[in-house]
Image (spheres, helix red, strand yellow):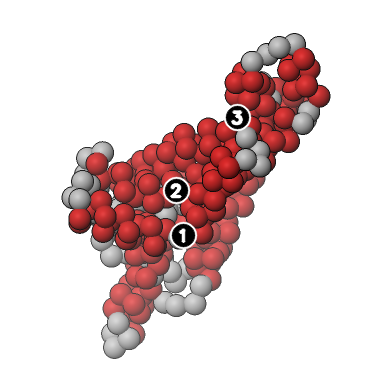
Amino acid sequence: MKAFILNRLLSVIPVALGVVTLVFLIIHLTPGDPVEIMLGETAQAADKEELRRELGLDRPILEQYFSFLGKLAHGDLGNSLYTKRSVTESIKERYSATAQLALSSMFLAIIIAVPLGVIAAARKDTAIDNGAMAVSLIGVSIPSFCIGPLLILVFGIELQWFPVSGRGGLDSLVLPSVTLGTAMAAILSRLARSSVIEALNEDFITTARAKGVKERVILFRHALSNALIPVVTVAGLQLGALLAGAIITETIFAWPGIGRLTIQAINARDYPLTQGCVLTIALSYVLVNLVVDVLYTVIDPRVRQK
């Protein structure tokens, strides 16, 4: 187990370095001059050159890259070109909000999807199965920019049960979590159903039934445990996407997450802040994939041998 985790950690290093390099190049080679955006096109050339020198944008791209790596090694992502605040601190403030929203949405999706998928698989081709899959199809089909406003109208404005914007107490988390969790639950439930159906056709399930094992134990202990690998894989990808910032949902509910921060930084051509946000998003995917790899070994110990 320890050797497996160590091997995965070592494999993350070149991936992380590649991500850092790619993010740096994309940000710095994208057309547009942040100095002109900050000072305006009518600013004097001397003023532009002075600001460009202060920001280090007049140096060769390779020199800027190694300077960036050196600062990154010490946890320094620089300061925003506009607010002059530390990029690291700005991201910390917003990332916690996105992580809270992502984890709550994922928790909601899992507690809905897994039981629904297992029950649908156990009642394959019955009214229960068809009804469950119809509900999941509706969940997949309706985009978040439709679900969000509908939830706001019904539960925020008409019933006034929950706040419609901002990040406050736990009640402010309900509507955006349901908005994101609904689509994820629909995807995971269909995947759980197909995986459990496949597992139920295996020989060990026939053996368990021949021994008189209860159907509930067969479903949730034997079949589900062998069907979790694809579910965990897709759930990990979904969680990575949420940690990248659910931009539409964060915009609808005015949620102060990293997705909105990234869009604001891109619109302002704020190099350090954009760079920091995109890098955080990319490394979140890498970290989630590492966690998923470790979960594989818990679900199925045979993975450690591969």
Q: Residue 41's image quarter? A: bottom left
Vertically, is 52 above or below 200? below
Viewer-nearest residue: 82 or 157: 157
| Amino acid type shown at disc 2 | Thr
Query: CA separation, marks 3 and 2?
Result: 24 Å
- Give the mark, 1 or 3, whose residue is nearer the N terminus: 1
Vertically, is 53 above or below 3? below
At a point 34% along the width and 77% down the height, the residue shown is 37
| Residue, disc 3 | 295
| Circles 1 and 3: CB atoms closer than 8 Å | no
| Amino acid type shown at disc 3 | Leu
Task: Identify the residue at the far front of this view.
Answer: 127
Q: Position of residue 208 (x, y in %)?
A: 74, 16
Viewer-nearest residue: 135 or 46: 135
Quadrant in which the C terminus appears: top right
Task: Identify the residue at the far right of this view.
Answer: 203
User: Is 142 on the left or on the right of 20, as rendered?
Assistant: left
Callout 1 environment at 10 Å: few (<14), some (14 to 19), or many (20+)? few
Q: In the structure shown, which secondary structural element does the residue marked by tag 2 occupy?
A: helix
| Residue, disc 1 | 142
